[in-house]
Amino acid sequence: MKNKKILLYDIETSPNISAVWGKYEQNTIWNEQEWYMLSFAYKWLGEKKAHVYSLPMFDAYKKDKCDDSSLVLMLHTLMDLADVVVGHNSDKFDNRKANARFIFNGIEPPSSYRSIDTLKVARRYFKFDSNKLNDLGEHLNVGKKVETGGYKLWKGCLENDKKSWKLMEKYNIQDVELLEQVYLRLRPWMTNHPSIRTDTGIEHICPKCGSTDIHKEGFKYTKVNTFQRWKCDSCRGWSQSRIPEKEIKPVITN
């Protein structure tokens, strides 16, 4: 059985370069250079390794260090193939930033996809001390982000320092690998996780992970129907049959 494609990804962008009169809480006098995409890393759920693309990998970079057209076109191709897209703070940042560079570069919208933002998932179902990706990774004991040294890394990339680009790529890849581990830990708790089953007519499949290793575990009752509940032995998530076990007919009295 073929499941839907789940894309995990993370982007890195340049800062805006602006002129200001002071150091703190300043309005910009003018924007010298607007932000653009530096790199992105991605991983199809179930793949062994994550992949990364950065500006120096494309010919356009030799002529214009700010030309991200080829980079964002590559990202667009991947998102166009995805049924579900997973990111951390992606609804507010990555997805919208990607869209901003798509339209800037004259690229049409990718095909529709379901978005899973693990930051929103963490906030909705839990009360962690911090919902940052690195803190979630450490708290759930699944890993942590690569140390970057702060803004110097981004400055190094803007100055075309090869060591900085290598570290940026490593940092980007680790973010996606950590994202996957955090997502997998959060997934069983998601009551609104999009079904990844294709329309095969097979009922007894976990809609969250696609496993057939599930067993019956009680019933879910509504006012008019009874549904079989299922527990997945792979991802430990819950689901219920789409077809009711039996219909409770209303009692009509005179």
Image (spheres, grey):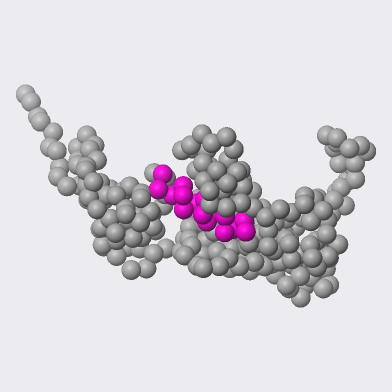
- In depth, the one of 72 and 178 nearer the eye is 178
| Location of residue 254 with respect to 245 vertically, above or below | above
Q: Is residue 123 visible?
A: yes
Examine the structure image and report whether residue 4 is included in the region drawn in magenta. no
Query: Residue 248 vs residue 71: left or right?
Result: left
Q: How many marks?
A: 0
**The C terminus: image quadrant:** top left
Question: From which residue to which does the magenta span run?
Answer: 174-189
Q: Is residue 101 visible?
A: no
Q: Residue at x 24, y 40 (%)?
A: 220
| Location of residue 204 with respect to 249 vertically, above or below | below
Q: Residue placed farthest to the bottom in the image?
A: 59
Q: Position of residue 133 (x, y in %)?
A: 60, 47
| Location of residue 221 with respect to 71 vertically, above or below | above
Q: Position of residue 81 (x, y in %)?
A: 51, 66
Examine the structure image and report whether residue 175 is included in the region drawn in magenta. yes
Q: Residue at x 79, y 62 (%)?
A: 164
Query: Residue 220 vs residue 129: left or right?
Result: left
**The N terminus: image quadrant:** bottom left
Chief secondary structure of the magenta span?
A: helix
